[in-house]
DNA sequence: CAGGATTTTGCAACAGGTTGCAAAAATCCT
DNA sequence: AGGATTTTTGCAACCTGTTGCAAAATCCTG
C-alpha cells in the first residue's frame, strides 16, 4: 500500500540507488537526476521508511526519554522543553514512564529492541545501575537534572547542586534566620546529598547546622507528610530549604494547616522555580534551575554522543539563581 | 556488534527460521528446538530487533501520542496514565508536542515514516483536519479527552460534555446562584461548545442564560486574563463555570486580585479534577473526568483498531461526577 | 510394521532501504 | 580531438527478520 523506493525509481526511470541517494544528504547525485526523482516522489507522495533504512545505517533517530517523575508538575515543563528540543534536532522521543511498579529491566530491553540512538534520563531517583546497562550496550546516555550514581561514560547535565545548597544557606542567613532546616527530596538522589552538603557548608561558615528531614518523593503529598513530621520533630526551626518546589508547596500547606503563617511564622525556600511557584496563591521564593539551558545542553550532548561516543563522558554544570517571592521574610 | 538471529541459529545448530519461530507466538516449533534456541539466545543475550521484524510484519507497536497541552498540569497526569497503560499493552508511545509554533504536517509525516501502528490524540484543540490525514493513510486514530472535528472513522473517548455542562448548571442553581457565567476553554474546541450547550440547556430550564467568555488556552495565565476581562465585562455574575481546572485557578487568582472573596463573593466551579484541585491552597470545587477510564478505553480502542480497523469508528462516553470542595457557597 | 496424517524444519524469497564497486558518462586539460 | 580525471549511475550484496512451501521427521492406526 505505501509507496516504496522501487515505485519512485520506476516512475522516475532511474535505479533504486539514485532514489536512495537523493534522499541521503551528501550523496552523489546529479542535479538532473535529483530533479526527476524529486518530481516523481512528490507525485507519488513518497516518504522514506526510516525503520528500513535504520537496518543498514544503524540509526533510528529514536531517543529513549526516561523519567519517573510523573507526579511533579515541574516535569511537564521539562517534557515540554525536551520534546521541542528533540523535535528541533530531528530526534524522536520514545517516552518511558519508570514509576516504581514498572519493571526497569523490561523497559531497558525494550529500548534496545527499538535500537534507540541514545537515552536521556530525566530523573535523579532511578536505580543506580540503570545507566550502566545502556552504556554497556554502547548506547549513549545523558542524565539531565541530576543523577543517581557515578556511572562512568555518561553525559551529565545539571545545576551545581552544592552551589544551590550554598545559595540557599546564604539566603536564609541573609534574612536573619538562624535555626534552619533541610527538607530534602528522596534521600537516594545524589542531588539531595549534594544540596545538603552545600547547605551545611554555607551554614557552617556561620557556625550553624541544619535540622534534616527527607521527603520520600517529589510530590505534594510527600512534602506535606514530611513537613508534618518536621514540625513535630523540630518545631523551633524558623525556615526550611526544600529540595523541590512541589515538595515546598506541600510543606507550606502542612505548615499552614498547623497554624503557621508564612513567612512571618515560618520561612520556606524551594528549588526549581516551576511555573506554578509564580502563581498568586503560591508565591514561592525559590532557586531557579535554568531548565531550558539544561535541556538544550542535554540534547546537544546526546547528539555529540551519537556522532562520537568518545566525546560523551562529560559533565555540564549550569548556574542557578535566586527568585524572590513571598515565602521568606525581608532582611532584618 | 549486536547479536542477530543468525548468530543464535548458528549457536543452536538450527536454521534462522527455527529461531524466528521460537520468538513468534503461535508458530510451530518442537519443544526440543525451542529449548536449544532459548538456551543459545540466553547465552548470547539475544534480543530480536523489532524494527527489522516490522519490515515484514508491518507492526511496530509504536503509538504516536500527540498533544499540545504542555502548559496544563492535568496533562502530566494524563501522560502518566497513558504511558503506563500503553506499556502494559506492550505498546510504545512516541511523544509528539504539537504546540502552536510546531509544524503539524511535519509531525504527521514523521509518524508515518516511523510506521506507527496507531495514533492517540490527547487534545481538543488541534487543527480540525488533523486526524483525517492519519485516517486517510489507514492509521487508526483515537481522540481522547475531546476532539476538534467530526472526523469520520476515528475512535473517540471522552466524558459527555453536554452532560458536564448540564451538571455544572444544575449545581450552580442548586447553590442558589442565578447570575452565572461560562468561562470556557478555547472556543475552537468541540468540548467547549458542547459544555456550553449543556450549560445553557440546564439554565434555560430555570429561565436563565449565562454570560459567556472564553480563555485562549488551557493555562493559568489564560484563565487569569479571561477572568480579569470577565469581571470587567460582567461584574454582576455571581458564579462562573470554568472550562478547565487550571483556567479556574487562574481565574480564581484574578478574582482574588480584584478583591473578590471565594466563595462568598464569587463562586467557581472547574472541570477535570486534576490532583492539584485538591491541594489545600486550591480547594477547587470541580467536575471530575474519569481520566483512568478514559485512558483505559482509549488504549483499548486503539488496540482493537489496530487488530481490525473496521471496529474503530466508535464513540465512548463516560460519566463525570461533581467533586465538592470550597469554591461554591453552601446550599442556601 | 506399513501407510497415511500431522507436525516440524529449512530453503529461499521477501520486506524497504543502503552502499561498495566497477562501468558509464561528463568534465577537464593540453 | 584525445586522453586523463572526476562525477554519476546501476548492479548486486547486504542489513535483520518473516513466511510460503515443500521436504523431512514424527505420530498414529490398524
Image (cartoon, coloured by chain):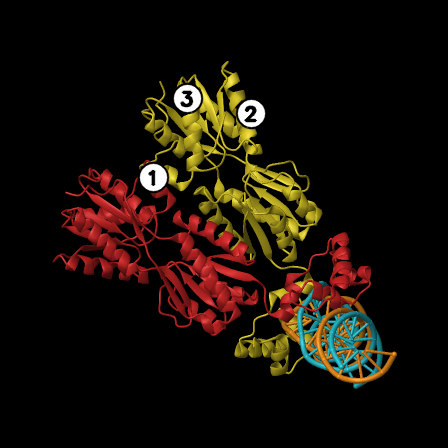
Chain colours: A red, B yellow, C cyan, D orange
> Residue B220 location in percent, x, y?
42, 37
Residue B320 located left or right of residue B135:
left
> Residue B96 location in percent, x, y?
55, 50
Circle 2: is it few (<14), some (14-19), or many (20+) Cα within 10 Å?
Answer: some
> Residue B309 location in percent, x, y?
69, 48
Q: Which SS class for mark 2?
A: helix
Q: Which SS class for mark 1?
A: loop
Which mark's residue is nearer the viewer, 3 or 1?
3
User: Label 2 lies in what chain?
Assistant: B
Mark 1, residue position: B279
| Residue at the limit of the structure toward the top, as seen here | B207
Q: Can residue B323 be seen in this view?
A: no
> Are callouts 1 and 2 both on one chain?
yes
Query: Which quadrant of the view contains residue B149?
Result: top right
Query: Which quadrant of the view contains residue A37?
Result: bottom right
- Label located before the other in sequence (3 or 2): 2
| Label 3, label 1: how far apart the Cα atoms are | 29 Å
User: Label 3 lies in what chain?
Assistant: B
Residue A202 located left or right of residue B213:
left
Q: Nearer the viewer, residue A242 or B332?
A: A242
- Label located before the other in sequence (1 or 2): 2
Determine the residue positioned at 43% across, 25% down: B229
Mark 2, residue position: B197
Q: Which mark is residue B292?
A: none
User: Label 1 lies in what chain?
Assistant: B
Which mark's residue is nearer the viewer, 3 or 2?
3
Mark 3, residue position: B232
Amino acid at each position: 500500500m505505501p509507496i516504496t523506493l522501487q515505485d519512485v525509481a520506476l516512475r522516475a526511470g532511474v535505479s533504486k540507488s539514485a532514489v536512495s541517494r537523493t534522499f541521503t544528504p551528501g550523496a552523489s547525485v546529479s542535479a538532473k537526476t535529483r530533479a526527476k526523482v524529486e518530481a516523481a516522489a512528490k507525485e507519488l507522495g513518497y516518504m522514506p521508511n526510516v525503520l528500513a533504512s535504520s537496518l543498514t545505517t544503524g540509526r533510528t533517530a529514536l531517543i529513549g526519554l526516561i523519567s519517573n517523575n510523573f507526579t511533579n508538575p515541574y516535569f511537564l515543563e521539562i517534557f515540554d522543553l525536551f520534546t521541542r528540543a528533540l523535535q528541533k534536532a530531528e530526534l524522536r522521543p520514545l517516552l518511558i514512564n519508570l514509576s516504581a511498579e514498572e519493571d526497569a529491566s523490561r523497559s531497558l530491553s525494550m529500548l534496545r529492541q527499538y535500537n534507540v540512538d541514545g537515552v536521556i534520563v530525566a530523573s535523579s531517583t532511578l536505580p543506580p545501575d540503570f545507566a550502566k546497562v545502556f552504556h554497556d550496550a554502547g548506547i549513549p546516555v545523558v542524565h539531565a537534572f541530576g543523577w543517581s550514581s557515578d556511572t562512568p561514560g555518561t553525559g551529565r547535565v545539571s545545576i551545581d547542586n552544592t552551589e544551590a545548597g550554598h545559595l540557599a544557606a546564604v539566603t536564609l542567613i541573609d534574612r536573619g534566620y538562624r535555626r534552619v532546616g533541610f527538607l530534602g527530596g528522596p534521600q537516594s538522589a545524589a542531588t539531595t546529598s549534594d544540596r545538603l552538603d552545600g547547605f551545611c557548608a554555607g551554614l557552617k561558615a556561620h557556625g550553624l547546622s541544619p535540622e534534616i528531614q527527607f521527603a520520600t518523593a517529589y510530590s505534594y503529598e510527600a512534602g506535606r507528610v514530611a513537613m508534618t513530621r518536621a514540625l513535630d520533630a523540630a518545631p523551633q526551626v524558623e525556615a526550611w530549604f526544600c529540595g523541590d518546589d512541589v515538595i515546598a508547596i506541600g510543606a507550606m500547606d502542612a505548615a499552614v494547616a498547623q497554624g503557621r503563617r508564612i513567612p512571618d511564622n515560618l520561612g520556606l525556600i524551594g528549588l526549581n522555580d516551576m511555573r506554578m511557584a509564580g502563581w498568586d496563591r503560591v508565591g514561592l521564593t525559590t532557586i531557579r534551575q535554568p531548565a531550558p539551558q539544561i535541556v538544550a545542553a542535554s540534547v546537544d550532548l546526546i547528539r555529540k554522543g551519537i556522532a562520537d561516543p568518545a566525546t560523551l563522558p562529560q559533565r555540564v554544570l549550569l548556574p542557578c539563581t535566586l527568585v524572590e517571592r513571598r515565602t521568606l521574610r525581608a532582611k532584618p
